[in-house]
Amino acid sequence: MKKGNTVFFKNTPAILSYAAVCGSKEKEGIVGTYADITLEDDMYGESTYEKAECKMLSTAISLAIKKSGLEEDKIDVLLSGDLLNQIISASFAARDFEFPFLGLYSACSTMSESILLGAALVDGGYVNTAVCATGSHFASAERQYRYPLELGCTRPPQSQWTVTGAGGLVLGRSDKGVKVTCGTMGRVRDYGVTDVNNMGAAMAPVDGIITP
Amino acid sequence: MTGRTRENYNKNYLEYVKTQDPPTKHFKNCAAAFGVGGLICCIGQFIRYMLSYIGLTGDELAGATSVVLIFLGCLLTGLGVYDRIGRYAGAGSIVPITGFANSVTSPAIEFKTEGWIYGMAAKMFTVAGAIIVFGVCSGVIVGLIYLFV
């Protein structure tokens, strides 16, 4: 059923399990207590930040599957994406698994998009279980979108930080756990924010404020 | 207020965003930039005096002073100190020649993971390239004016 831009699910797709990996800066904040694994070293024992991002994502996916108690061959599909070119972290993380992979790109809303699409697949009966996952890394995102880390430039007070972390969850039909009842598909709205340091203003406009 | 056109939406929204931004501490930033920038200049002057003791004069002296400052800028970037100074000092550490050294060294370090040739060497001037292009162009134009006037 669809109402406006929101789709409603009938057959109660539910979150069977979830896992999160986060970096050392995130550990200091409120999300740190909810993470399963916290990195002491943001390189995660790898040679580059991109490889670290990929490893975080892969770890989050395998941990979520492990926590669900399902075998890996019971997973039907992986829906995942990240912030880098050609969603390279998600694509490379998908090498570690035997189930098929659908790559998504939706910037910061990749996780919610993956849950919406995963829930639709589960609800429609096309798959029994779907894994939804997303990851990002502060250092790799800075390099992709802004300046090198060692460049001595000032950050304005309103600048935001890209999360170092990855999260994954397993969707399946169940009466237990958090159910996915509906999902709203977002529209792209460009209100002319060009400040690379103020991503929040570009991505979360509120219509009531801008409509005169 | 204004009509319901796309331009007005954008204008209203950007005005709203501006009201939500935390204020920039201009006085504190200016003071930090003045202090650190002045300190870098003092260090430069100190190096200049030291080099004049070993017998350098004129253009040689100016060149050698710049080389020492560039080296220090690169070294501090490599040690991961210069970006911390920059975060505090802003223009104070960007404007002197050490800031230029930092803008060349930092992408070189960042892209080293992509290889020595296609990574470090190719991406070294991603930040400083614009400065070099317009610096050389304006140098040529000023030189031509100087030649004919």
Image (cartoon, rainbow, N blue to C red):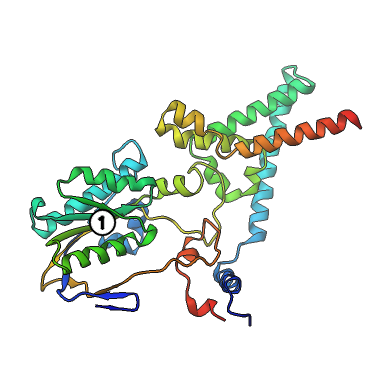
Q: Quadrant of residue A108?
A: bottom left
Q: Residue A174: image x %, image y %?
A: 11, 70
In the figure, B137 relative to A31: above or below? above
- Residue A147 can be seen in this image: yes
Packing grade of label 1 (10 A; few <14, some 14-19, many >=20) is many
Q: Residue at x 41, y 33 (%)?
A: B114
Q: Quadrant of the N terminus of chain A?
A: bottom left
Q: Quadrant of residue B141?
A: top right
- Residue A21 can be seen in this image: no
Residue with the most extreme right position = B149
Secondary structure state at the residue bearing disc 1: strand
B109 and A124: which is toward the camera? A124
Q: Residue B68: image x %, image y %?
A: 64, 27
Q: Amino acid at mark 1?
A: Ala
Residue with the most extreme top position = B55
Number of numbered labels in the structure image:
1
> Would you name the residue on which mark 1 appears?
A133
A66 and A45: which is toward the camera? A66
Q: Quadrant of the C terminus of chain A?
A: bottom right
In the figure, A207 relative to A145: above or below? below
Q: Residue at x 25, y 74 (%)?
A: A182
Q: Residue B47: image x %, image y %?
A: 69, 28
Q: Residue at x 25, y 45 (%)?
A: A93
Chain that bears disc 1: A
A38 and B47: which is toward the camera? A38
Q: Quadrant of residue A43?
A: top left
Q: Residue A11: image x %, image y %?
A: 14, 74
Residue B21 appears left or right of B110: right
Residue B101 appears left or right of A90: right
